[in-house]
């Protein structure tokens, strides 16, 4: 199946799945209150995460039988043996759970496909922001309106750090943001929730750099954003400039996630390297 997988057709099938998950998330969001559990320290999960996870996994299994699905809220036993598979789905049913709980709207449904170890397709839907994005290698990247109209998106043409805006995790403190702005000489540094929301800001040219050095979540946090950013003409690597390997069996992004418009990528990697001990 992977040898003949049509990425355009796959996007057409997967986007409605993301919409269905979004509807389930918004139904919980509309209640105004949500019970929060913790899978680990500073790792919350809600019923919205779990409902969206179930919807997406069931739909992907029906549409793409035989392809492993590595989903954040699934029992790891359900995707045992995925390493080395020629194609794998990486699913974050509710990226930005802390933002969902804080009710600031910066959360997303993310579905990514990796083929032969590389991110090739991504779907990101931001339920509260009412924005949807798709992208795939060989297809391009698009924002999709409610009526299905696709508008091509592309990264910015900013060529210097002095002109650039960076989006960073809200976990950065104010002093860290000030230091980053001074060190890089950036025009602006903006805290933002959800890897998906930050990724689409790069893909649309609304920002120029997404910098998350150090631990940057799991492969389901990076696959869809990487695919869309690259399909939109940008670049995405770890903080050392190395490509992500999605077939290795490793799930943790222990060496950061950097996405840029491409023109600034080398400069950002150099800055991070200089700041490392």
Image (cartoon, rainbow, N blue to C red):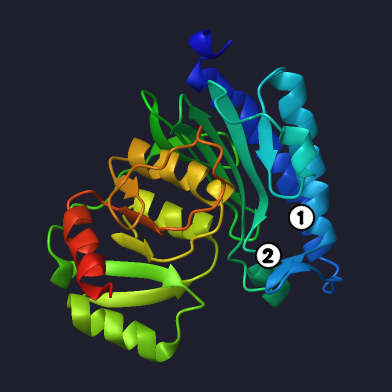
Q: Earlier in the sequence, mark 1 or mark 2?
A: 1
Q: Nearer the viewer, residue 149 or 7?
A: 7
The residue indicated by pointer 1 is 49
Label drawn at residue 224: none
Q: Quadrant of residue 38?
A: bottom right
**112 sits left or right of 72 in the view:** left
Q: Quadrant of residue 85?
A: top right
The residue indicated by pointer 2 is 97
In the picture, the quarter occupied by the N terminus is top right
Q: Residue at x 37, y 91 (%)?
A: 175
Question: Residue 207: in sight, yes or no?
Answer: no
Q: Nearer the viewer, residue 130 or 52?
A: 52
Q: Nearer the viewer, residue 30 or 100?
A: 100
Q: Residue at x 19, y 71 (%)?
A: 274
Task: Give the distance between the C-alpha atoms of the residues marked 1 and 2, in whole angstroms.
Answer: 8 Å
Q: Secondary structure at mark 1?
A: helix
Q: Is residue 255 above or below residue 164?
A: above
Instruction: Spot the residue most to the bottom.
Output: 175
Residue 26 image position (x, y, % from top left): 76, 57
């Amino acid at each position: 199946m992977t040898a003949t997988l049509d990425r355009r057709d796959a996007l057409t099938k997967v986007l409605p799945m993301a919409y269905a998950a979004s509807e389930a998330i918004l139904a919980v969001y509309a209640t105004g209150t949500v019970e929060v559990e913790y899978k680990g320290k500073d790792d919350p999960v809600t019923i919205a995460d779990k409902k969206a996870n179930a919807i997406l996994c069931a739909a992907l299994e029906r549409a793409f039988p035989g392809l492993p699905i590595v989903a954040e809220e699934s029992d790891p036993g359900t995707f045992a043996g995925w390493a080395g598979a020629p194609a794998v789905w990486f699913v974050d049913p509710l990226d930005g759970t802390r933002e969902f709980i804080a009710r600031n709207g910066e959360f997303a449904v993310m579905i990514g496909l990796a083929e032969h170890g590389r991110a090739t397709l991504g779907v990101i839907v931001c339920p509260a922001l009412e924005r949807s994005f798709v992208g795939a290698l060989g297809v391009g990247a698009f924002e999709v309106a409610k009526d299905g109209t696709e508008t091509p998106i592309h990264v910015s043409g900013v060529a210097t750090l002095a002109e650039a805006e960076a989006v960073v995790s809200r976990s950065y403190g104010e002093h860290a943001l000030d230091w980053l702005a001074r060190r890089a000489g950036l025009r602006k540094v903006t805290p933002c929730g959800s890897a998906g929301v930050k990724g689409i800001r790069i893909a649309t040219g609304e920002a120029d750099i997404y910098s998350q050095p150090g631990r940057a979540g799991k492969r389901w946090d990076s696959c869809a954003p990487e695919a869309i950013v690259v399909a939109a003409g940008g670049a995405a690597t770890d903080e050392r400039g190395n490509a992500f390997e999605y077939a290795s069996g490793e799930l943790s992004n222990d060496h950061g996630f950097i996405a840029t418009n491409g023109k600034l990528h080398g400069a950002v990697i150099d800055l991070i390297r200089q700041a490392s001990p």
